[in-house]
Amino acid sequence: MGAVLGLCSMASWIPCLCGSAPCLLCRCCPSGNNSTVTRLIYAFFLLLGVGIACIMLMPGMEGQLKKIPGFCEGGIGSSIPGVEGHVNCDVLVGYKAVYRVCFGMAMFFLLFSLLMIRVKSSQDPRAGLHNGFWFFKFAAATAITVGAFFISEGPFTTVWFYIGMAGAFCFILIQLVLLIDFAHSWNESWVEKMEEGNSRCWYAALLSVTALNYLLSLVSLVMFYVYYTHSDGCTENKVFISINMLLCIAASVMSILPQIQESQPRSGLLQSSLVTLYTMYLTWSAMTNEPDRKCNPSLLGIIGLNTTTPAGQDHVVQWWDAQGIVGLILFLMCVLYSSIRNSSNAQVNKLTLTSDESALIEDGPQPDSFEEGGGLNRAVDNEKDGVTYSYSFFHFMLFLASLYIMMTLTNWYR
């Protein structure tokens, strides 16, 4: 009898696997809008792929990967940018696997980005494909990823490397836009609370956070000059640090100019401080790829720990250095924020191809938003009058995110 009940319970999930996003999550998650839940599921798809890519870099995986027919024959050769001559396949087989896992994810999201062009509401038949059929989409993404492992080496790695660099650069710009949007929403929320009451408390909090961001940026700047430059060398590092410092100062001054305040009354130093801190991270991330070890000391070396490589481990591939971990954390925050964000900023909405009217749909009252089905709250379609975000751009952003995480996990093939 228990087995029969278990089979019935499993069978009840089958329609959800082929149906809408709220149906898929209604049994384990709080009720929510269809648009938000759908984006969270796609974000879960991406994060699952990131987890698999990380597994490919774990010690001991190279032995399993070499069992794939043709995946390691003849080594890698000289087709990898920046690597001359013949290279033992044991060294970079993990990077090759990451490239193929991310290729599968990227192609999946790029395909949906093309399919969802100019979808205006959930009444479009393509919207049903976007918001449902999760089992089949998961199977398709898995099939594309598995098939990518059987792509012959040839020029694949070189071509995909340059595509990855371009896509990762674009995603860094998107990260910056989302960071500014987040800072704008944060600043707007606290200013509104200041105006409602207890202004001293909220003003102190706003001032403290802004000062903390600038303090961390200043400390980072000093450490860059101390550890990543020398009086007789490291010219590139000196130039990049100085230029980025001047640009951050200019952005901070511009944010409080009267002309800017008239155009954007809620703009201020909080946004500039976050952008400054993020710029310091990007500067550090770039300098950690400097081939000259005198201009690129390891983080363990800076704090005084021994970083000597043990004998016999000259060619160990790993991604879990400090820069990779910080980049991965920022990546996760960016993806999750983009999945739940609902910006009222007109400039950001234009950039993400989201109309202001669509943003109001998300915020507006939904009197019939929930149905009672078997004692469970289920979110129903909240996009009948218009989508709350651009389906096509969202998938394109995840496509770029796949390329960014590929370059991050492989240390930009350093």
Image: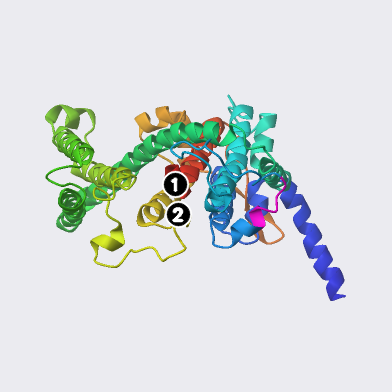
Three-letter residue code for mark 1? Thr
Q: Is residue 88 left or right of residue 126?
A: left
Q: Residues within 10 Å of mark 2 (few under 14, many from 20)?
A: some
**Bounds of the magenta segment:** 64-69
* Residue 389 visible to the viewer: no
Residue 358 image position (x, y, % from top left): 49, 32
Q: Nearer the viewer, mark 2 or mark 1?
A: 2
Three-letter residue code for mark 2? Trp
* Residue 156 visible to the viewer: yes
Q: Which residue is mark 1?
A: 408
First in residue order: circle 2 vs circle 1: 2
- Which residue lies most toward the bottom here? 1
Residue 267, disc: none
Residue 285 image position (x, y, % from top left): 32, 46
Tell whether label 1 touches label 2 (CB within 8 Å): yes
Residue 209 location, quadrant? bottom left
Indicate whether residue 288 is drawn in magenta.
no
Q: Is residue 281 above or below residue 266?
A: below
Marks 2/1: CA–CA distance: 8 Å
Majority secondary structure of the magenta segment? loop
Residue 150 location, quadrant? top right
Q: Residues within 10 Å of mark 1 (few under 14, many from 20)?
A: many
Residues 213 and 255: in front is: 213
Residue positioned 56% across, 53% down in the render: 90
Q: Which residue is mark 2?
A: 319
Indicate whether residue 67 is drawn in magenta.
yes
Q: Secondary structure at mark 2?
A: loop
Residue 30 location, quadrant? bottom right
Residues 227 and 207: in front is: 227
